[in-house]
Amino acid sequence: MIKPLRKRHLQIWSMLAILLPVGIISAWLAIPRQAVDKTLQPAHVNALSVILKSYKKPGAEIVNIRISADSSASQLEWINEETVTSPSALIYQKQKDDNSENITDADLIGRIEARGTYYFPLKNESKNNQFHFVIYDIIHHQVIEKINF
Amino acid sequence: MIIEILLVPVGLYLFCGFVFAIAFIVKGVSVIDEGAHGGSIGFRIIIIPGTMVFWPLLLKKWLRAKKQQHD
Amino acid sequence: MSASYQAVGWNKQKKKYDWIIFSFCVVYLIVFIGVTAYVNPDYTFETVLVRSTSTLALLLLHVILSIGPLARINKKFLPLLYNRRHLGVTMFTVALVHASFGIFQFHALGNVNPLVSLFMSNTNYGSLADFPFQALGFFALIIFFLMAITSHDFWLHNLGPKVWKTLHMMVYPAYFLIIMHVMLGVIQYETNPVFVLILGVGSSTLIVLHLIAGTREVKKDNEEFGLKQDGFVMVCGVNDIEDNRAKMFCIDKERIAVFKFERKLFAVNNVCKHQNGPLGEGKIVDGCLTCPWHGYQYLPQNGQSPPPFKEKVSTYDVKVQGQNVWVNPKPYPEGTERKGANF
């Protein structure tokens, strides 16, 4: 090797010492993140152990109020036996059965659609162990079903 | 579609190179490089791809060497 | 050594090296294909071939690029340098198989010219994650192709050392293209960080080796010599040079190799006429200075290759005063006889 060539080698590798890490790291950062499946509800919700109350509409749904063994948490278990045919079906909980179709004061619990078992945590302690739910079609703005038990 | 337009002249260039390479390995190579005298057939074959690429340069060298022989 | 050209300059040692390279490649491919068939039996044969050849070529490229600096750092690696050319052609052949099967698998089955398809099927040149990485590999392959087809002394001689060397230094940009070809290609969906790690270790090793060897060499080239007298420069002590070996000194523009041979000192230009190899890193074999790169030989007293060869290098005056060696950096015409300096 001759002197200018030795110098050229060093220059090239000094440049590569910058370019290679920059190239590798930026290409690494550019790796697209895998699309994450956002499930409608957490996958690992387990049924609480004690069934407090039950309601059944044959051929449509079974509704259970479940609580934990120490009564510290309560849960709505919704077993959908048929797929909901309304474009949307939201479950609202009301404090009392007021016969109105108004849901502005109600708590949104969750959404049901396909057949299967759904679990939703319940916030509000129910007075007298009475439960009032409204299944509401938010697109057509109409009540699909009222459940009081 | 620049690629399509480029491929044709490149192919043509290499084809000319191939035609030149045949003449070059038979005759030209010994004219421009004395190391080729008594060089093996394997050597002549192995320089064909390079000749196809660098043929204008070798052609120039060949013509120059021929001219010198005449002078 | 301007003897007649042969297709491949094989000798016993080179044949042995080539057998090692060949066997390694075959064993590597068999093991890769075997392991893949066991672990991922649903991969097609083309996919396995594309992947096995790509990893093999990448591995060989890293070995090739590390030989240069390794040989400068430790002379034990010189035999590898001697055989680097064959390794390079092997790497190109493996890469060509990879490219051919890749183009066949992804571009040859449509109604568009495969080469056009290679460039036109993905035109996201502005995106990193979707970058048409195959184009990068293609350009690197063109560089490797030009290097492979000119890997014969005929081309070194007829293109001239400057053009030839420039062409072969294109291996560095090609290496960058290959790394990006891998990073923007397979790494974008084979996202196991191990692959990035391996690639990172590979390229940082090369960077470190080249920077160490390069800085050492450039530092040596810039060494200043303090004592000057009648055109002579004091370079070292007599005992600093081993018998039948040399030390190199860059006094003016180029290095001068001062050899110790049969109780005398001789100085010649360090640059071998063949491929600019460093004569001063070689030793004296059968009374001739022997270039460590390809074994070209010169007589120490006149810098001429022994007949029938015709290469010549410049010679210089050397003298010994006390225990110190003095060299006059003014070159004599190539092949000029000098009587050397007794000590």
Image (tube, coloured by chain):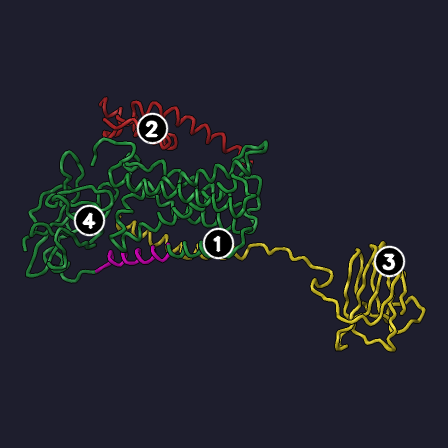
Chain colours: A yellow, B red, C green
Q: Amino acid at mark 2?
A: Ile
Q: Report the amino acid beneath label 1.
A: Phe
> Which amino acid type is shown beneath numbered disc 4?
Gly
Secondary element at tag 3: loop
Check disc 1: other Cα within 10 Å, few if <14, some if 14-19, many if 20+.
Answer: some
At numbered mark 2, what does the secondary structure look like: helix, strand or loop? helix
- What secondary structure prevails in the magenta region? helix
Q: Are marks 1 and 3 in contact (CB under 8 Å)?
A: no
Q: Please give the name of the residue rendered at 28% of the width and 38% of the height, measured from the top-left corner.
A: C15
Mark closest to the chain's N terminus, 1 or 4: 1
Tell me the distance, in whole angstroms, between the alpha carbons under discs 4 and 2: 33 Å
Q: Are marks 3 and 4 in contact (CB under 8 Å)?
A: no
Q: Pinpoint residue C123: horizontal percent, then vertical percent.
A: 57, 43
Q: Position of residue A45 (x, y in %)?
A: 72, 66
* Res. C167 in view: no
Residue A60: assigned label? 3
Residue range (magenta): C206-223
Of badges 1 and 3, nearer the viewer stands 3
Mark 2, other Cα within 10 Å: few <14 / some 14–19 / many ≥20: few
Determine which quarter of the picture holds residue C23: top left
Give the label, 1 or 4, closer to the camera.
Answer: 1
Q: Which residue is mark 1?
A: C195
Q: Nearer the viewer, residue C231 or C335?
A: C335
Measure how far apart labels 1 and 4 are at the Cα level: 40 Å
Q: Marks 1/3: CA distance?
A: 53 Å
Residue at 17% across / 54% down in the picture?
Answer: C247
Mark 2, residue position: B45
Q: Which residue is mark 4?
A: C282
